[in-house]
Amino acid sequence: MEIIVVKYHRGLGTPGQIKTVTAGYAQNFLIPKGLAVPATPANRAHWRARADHTAKVQQQAVAAAQQAAKKLRTATVTITAPANDHGTLFAAVSVSRIVAALAAQEIIVQPADIQLSAPIKHTGEYPVGYRLVSGEQGSFRISIMAQP
């Protein structure tokens, strides 16, 4: 019996793959557990359309990441935060705060794209690395200033 894999199952395959399995395995285990559906023409068309949609979304994400990479190459981000007289911040600057500062400059990235070894806890300038979905990687400068 031919089935279309819906969820990953060890030894079965990845979602969207068409596999041939025994009828008993399909009817008694895979289909009731929601791991597969029969490979009918309607199900094949549905999974083909789903794969096309996924590919289109991935292409859009890569295009957006390439645009963000162009902006990140020349970006200098300034964040002001409360700090004591010695330059120690009261609250560390985390990845989410950096992403928000980039978004204010119309540079849209995901928190997972930013590579920060540890939260920033002192004022000053720091290099921040990034690795985008498109495969682009590099770094930009971030300047942490004490709030007046």
Image (spheres, helix red, strand yellow):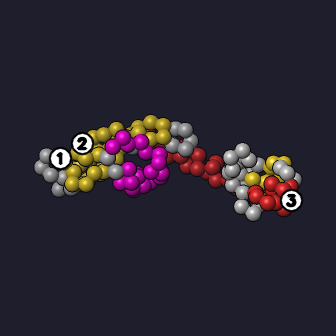
Determine crowd level at label 3: few under 14, some 14-19, many 20+ residues with C-alpha closer than 10 A: few
Q: CA distance from mark 1 to mark 2?
A: 8 Å
Question: Which amino acid lies under the numbered mark 2 shown in the image of this protein?
Answer: Gly
Q: Is residue 144 visible?
A: yes
At x 84% / y 56%, what residue is drawn?
Answer: 24
Q: Nearer the viewer, mark 2 or mark 3?
A: 3
Q: Which badge, 2 or 3, comes first in the chain's sequence?
A: 3
Q: Give the residue type at disc 3.
A: Thr
Q: Which residue is mark 1?
A: 87
User: Do labels 3 and 1 touch, CB within 8 Å?
Assistant: no
Q: Which residue is mark 2?
A: 124
- Secondary structure state at the residue bearing disc 3: loop
Name the element at disc 2.
strand
Residue in the picture at 23% in, 49% down: 145
Residue 51 can be seen in this image = no
Q: CA distance from mark 3 to mark 1?
A: 66 Å
* Highlighted magenta segment, given as a residue range: 95-118
Residue 40: give its label.
Answer: 3
Q: In front of the other: label 3 or label 1? A: 3
Within 10 angstroms of label 1, few (less than 14), some, or many (20 or more) residues? some
- Disc 2 from disc 3: Cα separation: 62 Å
Residue 25 coordinates in the image, percent (x, y)? 80, 54
Dots 1, 2 in contact, CB < 8 A? yes
50, 13: nearer the viewer = 13
Coordinates of residue 83 in the picture (x, y in percent): 18, 52
Residue type of the residue flagged with mark 1:
Gly
